[in-house]
Amino acid sequence: MNLPVLNTRVQMLIEHYARGRIKPFSEEIGLKSPQKLNRIFHPDPRNNQYPIPSIDIVLAILNHFEEVSEAWLLKGKGPMFKEDAVMSPKDVDAVADYVLLHERELMENDHFRVWYHNIELKAENRLLRSMEREDRKR
Protein backbone atom coordinates (compact mmCIF):
# COMPACT_ATOMS: atom_id res chain seq x y z
CA MET A 1 0.00 0.00 0.00
CA ASN A 2 1.41 3.36 -1.05
CA LEU A 3 1.62 6.38 1.19
CA PRO A 4 -0.94 9.05 0.15
CA VAL A 5 0.57 11.96 -1.80
CA LEU A 6 -0.11 14.55 0.92
CA ASN A 7 1.60 12.30 3.47
CA THR A 8 4.52 11.92 1.07
CA ARG A 9 4.90 15.69 0.77
CA VAL A 10 4.87 16.02 4.58
CA GLN A 11 7.51 13.30 4.69
CA MET A 12 9.62 15.30 2.19
CA LEU A 13 9.43 18.33 4.49
CA ILE A 14 10.46 16.21 7.48
CA GLU A 15 13.45 14.98 5.46
CA HIS A 16 14.32 18.54 4.44
CA TYR A 17 13.96 20.26 7.82
CA ALA A 18 14.71 17.50 10.35
CA ARG A 19 16.75 14.91 8.45
CA GLY A 20 13.78 12.55 8.53
CA ARG A 21 13.26 12.73 12.29
CA ILE A 22 9.60 13.13 13.24
CA LYS A 23 10.06 14.20 16.88
CA PRO A 24 12.26 17.25 16.18
CA PHE A 25 10.04 18.24 13.25
CA SER A 26 6.86 18.00 15.32
CA GLU A 27 8.48 20.07 18.08
CA GLU A 28 9.63 22.62 15.52
CA ILE A 29 6.12 23.15 14.15
CA GLY A 30 4.63 23.31 17.65
CA LEU A 31 2.79 20.01 17.95
CA LYS A 32 2.41 18.87 21.55
CA SER A 33 3.27 15.28 20.69
CA PRO A 34 5.01 13.62 17.72
CA GLN A 35 2.40 10.84 17.87
CA LYS A 36 -0.12 12.85 15.82
CA LEU A 37 2.44 13.28 13.04
CA ASN A 38 3.89 9.79 13.32
CA ARG A 39 0.52 8.11 12.80
CA ILE A 40 0.16 9.47 9.24
CA PHE A 41 3.02 7.18 8.21
CA HIS A 42 1.44 3.98 9.53
CA PRO A 43 -1.76 2.30 8.30
CA ASP A 44 -4.68 2.42 10.72
CA PRO A 45 -5.21 -1.20 11.85
CA ARG A 46 -8.99 -0.73 11.78
CA ASN A 47 -9.14 -0.14 8.02
CA ASN A 48 -5.56 -0.66 6.84
CA GLN A 49 -5.54 2.88 5.38
CA TYR A 50 -3.04 5.64 6.02
CA PRO A 51 -4.67 8.57 7.84
CA ILE A 52 -4.26 11.85 5.98
CA PRO A 53 -2.63 14.75 7.85
CA SER A 54 -5.10 16.76 9.89
CA ILE A 55 -5.70 20.44 9.22
CA ASP A 56 -3.75 21.11 12.46
CA ILE A 57 -0.65 19.48 11.01
CA VAL A 58 -0.95 21.20 7.64
CA LEU A 59 -1.50 24.63 9.17
CA ALA A 60 1.27 24.14 11.73
CA ILE A 61 3.66 23.43 8.85
CA LEU A 62 2.48 26.41 6.80
CA ASN A 63 2.56 28.75 9.81
CA HIS A 64 6.06 27.74 10.84
CA PHE A 65 7.67 27.39 7.42
CA GLU A 66 6.33 30.39 5.55
CA GLU A 67 8.57 29.57 2.60
CA VAL A 68 6.68 26.32 1.93
CA SER A 69 4.24 26.70 -0.94
CA GLU A 70 0.64 26.09 0.04
CA ALA A 71 -0.19 24.95 -3.50
CA TRP A 72 2.64 22.41 -3.42
CA LEU A 73 1.75 21.05 0.01
CA LEU A 74 -2.00 20.82 -0.54
CA LYS A 75 -2.18 19.98 -4.23
CA GLY A 76 1.32 19.05 -5.36
CA LYS A 77 1.40 21.98 -7.79
CA GLY A 78 4.54 23.94 -8.44
CA PRO A 79 7.79 23.92 -6.48
CA MET A 80 8.08 23.11 -2.79
CA PHE A 81 9.21 26.61 -1.83
CA LYS A 82 7.50 29.92 -2.53
CA GLU A 83 10.63 31.72 -3.66
CA ASP A 84 10.63 29.38 -6.63
CA ALA A 85 6.86 29.41 -6.98
CA VAL A 86 4.61 31.42 -9.18
CA MET A 87 1.00 30.54 -8.46
CA SER A 88 -1.26 30.75 -11.43
CA PRO A 89 -4.54 32.63 -11.06
CA LYS A 90 -6.27 29.22 -11.25
CA ASP A 91 -4.23 27.96 -8.24
CA VAL A 92 -4.99 31.13 -6.27
CA ASP A 93 -8.68 30.67 -7.05
CA ALA A 94 -8.54 27.02 -5.95
CA VAL A 95 -6.97 27.91 -2.60
CA ALA A 96 -9.43 30.79 -2.09
CA ASP A 97 -12.36 28.53 -2.98
CA TYR A 98 -11.19 25.93 -0.47
CA VAL A 99 -10.84 28.53 2.29
CA LEU A 100 -14.25 30.02 1.54
CA LEU A 101 -15.91 26.60 1.37
CA HIS A 102 -14.41 25.52 4.72
CA GLU A 103 -14.26 28.93 6.41
CA ARG A 104 -16.33 28.05 9.49
CA GLU A 105 -14.35 24.89 10.20
CA LEU A 106 -11.03 26.59 9.50
CA MET A 107 -11.73 29.63 11.67
CA GLU A 108 -12.24 27.31 14.64
CA ASN A 109 -8.64 26.20 14.25
CA ASP A 110 -6.01 28.23 16.13
CA HIS A 111 -3.26 27.52 13.58
CA PHE A 112 -5.46 28.64 10.70
CA ARG A 113 -6.52 31.85 12.48
CA VAL A 114 -2.86 32.76 13.07
CA TRP A 115 -1.96 31.97 9.44
CA TYR A 116 -4.96 33.91 8.13
CA HIS A 117 -4.20 36.89 10.38
CA ASN A 118 -0.57 36.90 9.17
CA ILE A 119 -1.73 36.97 5.56
CA GLU A 120 -4.08 39.86 6.32
CA LEU A 121 -1.23 41.77 7.98
CA LYS A 122 1.10 41.16 5.02
CA ALA A 123 -1.56 42.39 2.59
CA GLU A 124 -2.18 45.46 4.73
CA ASN A 125 1.57 46.20 4.86
CA ARG A 126 1.86 45.90 1.08
CA LEU A 127 -1.06 48.28 0.65
CA LEU A 128 0.42 50.81 3.07
CA ARG A 129 3.84 50.67 1.37
CA SER A 130 2.16 51.17 -1.99
CA MET A 131 0.24 54.16 -0.66
CA GLU A 132 3.45 55.65 0.81
CA ARG A 133 5.21 55.29 -2.55
CA GLU A 134 2.31 57.04 -4.28
CA ASP A 135 2.43 59.86 -1.71
CA ARG A 136 6.18 60.32 -2.29
CA LYS A 137 5.62 60.60 -6.03
CA ARG A 138 3.31 63.57 -5.52
Image (cartoon, rainbow, N blue to C red):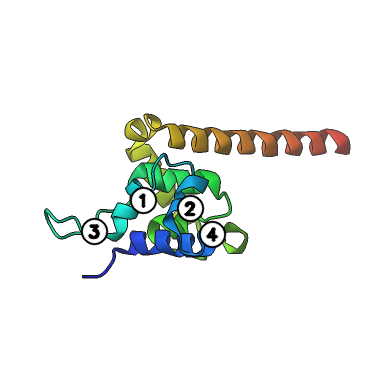
Q: Amino acid at mark 1?
A: Leu
Question: Label 3 to label 2, Cα distance in Å?
Answer: 20 Å
Q: Amino acid at mark 3?
A: Tyr
Return the residue found at the far left: 46
Element on which disc 2 rests: helix
Question: Label 1 to label 3, Cα distance in Å?
Answer: 12 Å
x, y percent for residue 66:
57, 49
Residue named by callout 3: 50
Which circle's residue, 2 or 1, is located before the other in the chain?
Answer: 2
Q: Amino acid at mark 4?
A: Tyr
Which circle's residue, 1 or 3, is located before the other in the chain?
Answer: 1
Question: Label 2 to label 1, Cα distance in Å?
Answer: 9 Å
**Looking at the image, which residue is at 37% across and 64% down?**
8
Quarter placement of the C terminus:
top right
Question: Label 4 to label 2, Cα distance in Å?
Answer: 7 Å
Which circle's residue, 4 or 3, is located before the other in the chain?
Answer: 4
- 134 over 43 or under it: above or below: above
Q: Are marks 4 and 2 in contact (CB under 8 Å)?
A: yes
Q: Are marks 2 and 1 in contact (CB under 8 Å)?
A: yes
Quarter placement of the N terminus:
bottom left
Q: Are marks 1 and 4 in contact (CB under 8 Å)?
A: no
Crowding at mark 4 (Cα within 10 Å: few <14, some 14-19, many 20+): some
Residue named by callout 2: 25
Res 17 label:
4
Element on which disc 3 rests: loop
